[in-house]
Image (spheres, coloured by chain):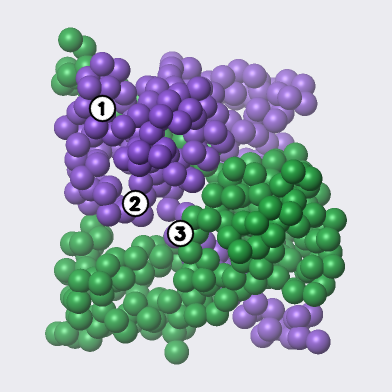
Chain colours: A purple, B green
Amino acid sequence: MPKNEGVSRSVVRRLPRYYRFLGDLLKKDVTRISSRELAQLMQLTASQIRQDLNCFGGFGQQGYGYNVAALHKEIANIMGLNKLNGTILLGAGNLGRTIAKHMHFESSGFRLEGIFDVNPQIIGQALNGLVVQDVAGLSAFCEAHRPRAAILCIPKEVAYDCAKELMALGVNCFWNFSHYDLTLNFEGAVVENVHLGDSLMTLCYQINAYYADEEASGLSGKAK
Amino acid sequence: MPKNEGVSRSVVRRLPRYYRFLGDLLKKDVTRISSRELAQLMQLTASQIRQDLNCFGGFGQQGYGYNVAALHKEIANIMGLNKLNGTILLGAGNLGRTIAKHMHFESSGFRLEGIFDVNPQIIGQALNGLVVQDVAGLSAFCEAHRPRAAILCIPKEVAYDCAKELMALGVNCFWNFSHYDLTLNFEGAVVENVHLGDSLMTLCYQINAYYADEEASGLSGKAK
């Protein structure tokens, strides 16, 4: 059994990447790999990999390395991908529709059970095998289905009220695409933010730093 | 002038959040704020905020705090939001279309100049004032427009070839939505990844940890 109390957030954040790389190795029929080889592949250090995986009990064998299939499966277990958490999606605009169509929910530990919107033109539309429902029915739906998580593809302005209602209905876990910091007002909530705007601005900073360096070193091929 | 060499990646990652909060304060006509008040609002410590902002020269005044408008503007400057980096988007499927429609490029330091796809059914469609072009014209476009960045909304399988071509065309900066670790093979590239799949799996881990705690403490209201 993996021991996973007190695992740091940064280790948890690296788990999906391990899982992806191990999945790729499996597809290539690689059956075992040393921490050194895995480190090279993932551009980490072997010691970092051993440290990370030791958080969960350590799966490597001296002189053998890791069994790829076993480690892949263990990491799936650690992340809980083998159980499906009932999930609802709020907001079926551009972003919500893309999330509903684009994501592999079932292989990521989720089952998308309901999609809700306020827009009468969107309500009733079919979306990935579900019919978009009026948000007025949210309470009855949660009562009946007891979803664990909600995906928020809603405007920032309504995020507070929406999260408040959901938490009152027993939904405490959020995949938050709205530009609202849920954690500020909902202490007990489990929140994973996807701040696309922040990500884009971070890239902007990096690009400017890159071009400043390039210009400073006189290597720029841009100025003709 | 802000001094921003050697600023840590984690500080850079926090800048957009400062920028968002200061923008909200501006909208509420707040003209100045102490590091203590800002810390409370953002759930950081005052010392963390002072440390972060000191990386760029420090903008606070003893006994006065921060001038909200000035700090907001300074952070925009630091991130380089006042210049627009020419950008192209590759892949106009569900995700690409949503990104094109959903993001505020111009206020984030980018100008979206071209959209490319391989699908004949998508090529020629209008998307946010641009016409989706055949990827066959990518080289000529880059020669003429010299975009700095590319947004990759393409499948993992084609990401390597696509990035290789772009880098040969002088595009070295990527907002990467493909599930491919560009940095592994393109050392000089500037990459900001959005791994939605990893984010979803991270949430899965957190949900399981949350419910394990709840069940362990006997507080679960789920089991009736």
Mark 2 chain? A
- Earlier sequence position, callout 3 versus callout 1: 1
Q: Which of label 1 and label 2 is nearer to you?
A: 1
Depth check: give the residue in front, A64 or B192.
Answer: B192
Q: At x 58% / y 31%, what residue is drawn?
A: A19
Say which of B211 and B128 sits in front: B128
Labelled pair 3, 1 in contact (Cβ < 8 Å): no
Q: Is residue A210 visible?
A: no
Callout 3: helix, strand or loop?
A: helix
**Dot 1, crowdedness within 10 Å: few (<14), some or many (≥20)?**
few
Please state if B205 lies on the left or on the right of B153 as rendered. left
Residue matched to label 2? A155
Q: In this rendered view, identify the residue nearer to me: A221 or B125.
A: B125
Relative image position of residue B22 (x, y in whole percent): 29, 71
Tag 1 and tag 2 share a subunit: yes
Q: Are marks 2 and 3 in contact (CB under 8 Å)?
A: no
How far is disc 1 from disc 2 in space, using C-alphas?
19 Å
Secondary structure category for the residue under label 1: helix
Q: Amino acid at mark 3?
A: Gly
- Which circle's residue, 2 or 3, is located before the other in the chain? 2
Name the subunit of mark 3. A
State which tag comes first along the sequence, 1 or 2. 1
Q: Say whether residue A191 is left or right of residue A131.
A: left
Give the alpha-carbon distance from disc 3 to disc 1, as whole Å. Answer: 31 Å
Tell me whether circle 1 and circle 2 mark residues in contact (CB < 8 Å).
no
Q: Residue furthest bottom?
A: B1
Per the image, the residue denoted by label 1 is: A137
Tell me whether marks 3 and 1 sit on the same chain: yes
Name the residue at the front extreme. Answer: A121
